[in-house]
Image (cartoon, rainbow, N blue to C red):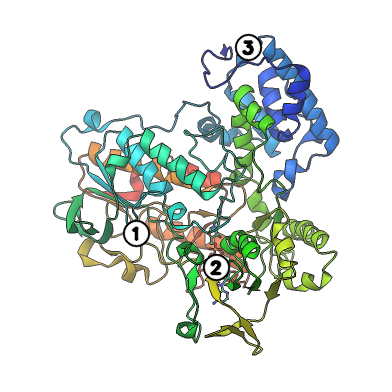
Amino acid sequence: MTTTPGEAMPAIKPITADDDTLRAHLSDAEAPALLMTVAHLTGDLSILRDDLRPNGWLFLPQGGLTDEQQDHARELALNALRRLREGAAVPRLDRGTLRRVTSWAMGGDTEDLVPLLEQELILPGEDPKAPDWRLDQVAPDRDARVVVIGAGLSGLLAAHRLTQAGVPVVVYEKNPDLGGTWFDNHYPGCRVDVPSHLYSYSFATRTDWPDHFCKHDELLSYLRDFAKQHGLLDLIRFNSEIRAAHWDEAAGQWRLTADTPDGPRTEQCTVLVSAVGQLNRPHVPQFPGSEEFAGPAFHSARWDHRVDLTGKRVAVIGTGASAFQFIPEVAKQASRLTVLQRTPPWLRPTPHYHDAVPAGVQWLYEHLPYYAAWQRFWLLAPGLRGVLEGWVVDPDYPPSERAVSALNDQLRATLTTYLESQLTDRPDLLPLLLPRYPVGAKRVLRDNGKWLATLKSDHVRLVTTAVDRLTPDGVRDADGELHPADVIIYGTGFQASQFLAPMTVTGRDGVDLHDYWSGDARAYLGLTVPGFPNLFCLYGPNTNLSGQGGSIIYFSECGVTYLVDAVRRLVQGGHRAMEVRPEVFSEFNTWVDEANSQRAWGFSNVSSWFVNAAGRTAQNWPFPAQDYWRRTRAVDPADYELR
Ligand code: NAP
């Protein structure tokens, strides 16, 4: 099927620009996405040559294509734009083309991925993942009320999808506004470190993101617009925190108690959805002398904007993803900045990390049909398949704290060269900043040079000796040196292993969820737990995509698809309760644990929030992202006791 621009695709604007203008627009475009777009639009798949294939998973900008290769892609795109200007028809993306283009890009047959990709490579306005049923059709008299806890990315999505299916939903949100972690985190420099064009719902993409990696307030605006547009605001009870949830087996209901602005409130629902996130309860280490420190001290996720850092001596503890973003901003204000690092991060070159989307690229998003979709695919692809290969332990390599496989060692070499290239003027810093653990054992951070430029500043000191204690005047390290500070900022992460805390959740037969987990949270597909019927956890245990190439929104969409299907099965079958079978849960977790132990993060001894106090990885999904999609497309009734 073909269509002309402006007809079935109102979001695409007609092309009137002259050749020079078109060339200028193309100059900043992502060459791999251009090649795919051109092949699709022209039908000339011969342009997808082996020697032009990008390598997206080696963390190289433009897929590692040379300048000449990029120029070649731009020339091809120019010809395609000329043809569109002359009125060429725009072919819809058919299965065959989808498969052939993506197979080229991913370096292997994507036949098994086509059903997934058909849901992702879509045009504005399309929504192939929307529920294909409505409550009033399948079970008109059924009470199917759902309570969602949390109005972050996952909670909003769940509320939207259930509303599409006509299921009554109420969302409880402890904060005065939506956004979850994006509401809590407003530290200076806070932005998404996943590309904005990927970090958005697949069916509600924006082509006009101002930045490649948008700032936190821009993301909040996106979420607010999403909620408003889909009528979700009326469903959310703000400033209302669910304290306890108790399963009533006889009634097939969850009984809830909540703290609300009007006092305690009781509530009940057929299905309970936890969408409380993993990264919202700050971890603040209790160093000896913490209470003695005389100045202000706060955590990155509780940033105290009343504290003026101008001219102050500031000590920051931690160099994880959050500190990495706010330290360069703090350095602009502080008179002296001490960075207390326990473990250095690996840095991934991302020259455009803080850049605005160039006007030319913006123009392409608006005028070149499918360019936005192919660009999104290009951002998604490494997480679907590919990037994980770099983290898999090869027992024959042999794996070590240096590298877990030959490919992992290759990544180490690439990233070491990158680090060294920035430290030619300060070789003294290299031993402090070169990680001694395999790439991927901790989150690899996107870098545009700002981090090391900051650490090299005269008024900034990198300290790698452990914190011993706090004193009224600052931080004393294990060598006894005092680092004077007027303000201490904790960039020390979150209590990521404490899933669903601090709620009390009591399931069938009075079993307490936290007792059941005993600090080591597990769920089937991250979603369901034996003994806790009709409870679904979004961004639950083992649903964090640790590879650099996907986004948590993808996982949320998979989880919500599964949730909506579960609600359908429950009501359509006239069931009171749906409970995962213990053997299914156990088998799944054994499978996950075995795989996690053979990944860089499970193998390495380095500290990270990917590993809980029991030494188990309760956070990460150890398989390609496509595997999670495959397993969450629909509920397998054999996995559950439906009663
Ligand atoms: P994090 O990655 O857990 O980093 C915590 C830092 O604090 C680490 O450097 C850690 O050192 C250090 N630390 C913890 N306890 C310490 C102690 N007792 N003494 C000294 N140092 C200590 O936390 P985060 O930076 O907040 O990031 C958490 C996750 O949030 C990220 O991995 C990412 O998934 C997400 N995040 C996303 C974005 C984004 O997209 N924009 C931004 C920020 C965060 P060790 O490394 O030695 O443990």
Task: Give the residue type at disc 3.
Answer: Ala
| Residue 615 percent location from the top left of the image | 51, 72
**Which residue bears the numbered disc 1?**
582
Q: Quadrant of residue 329?
A: bottom right
Q: Nearer the viewer, mark 2 or mark 1?
A: 2
Q: Residues within 10 Å of mark 1 (few under 14, many from 20)?
A: some
Q: Secondary structure at mark 2?
A: loop
Marks 3/2: CA distance?
53 Å
Q: Residue at x 71, y 33 (%)?
A: 29
**Which residue bears the numbered disc 2?**
491
**587 left or right of 508?**
right
- Residue at the limit of the structure toward the top, as seen here: 87
Establish whether ligand 1 lies closer than 8 Å to the Cβ of label 2. yes
**294 left or right of 238?**
right
- Report the front residue among 113 and 224: 224
**Which residue bears the numbered disc 3?**
89
| Residue 486 percent location from the top left of the image | 56, 77
| Residue 19 percent location from the top left of the image | 77, 18
Q: Is residue 635 visible?
A: no
Q: Secondary structure at mark 3?
A: loop
Q: Nearer the viewer, mark 3 or mark 1?
A: 3
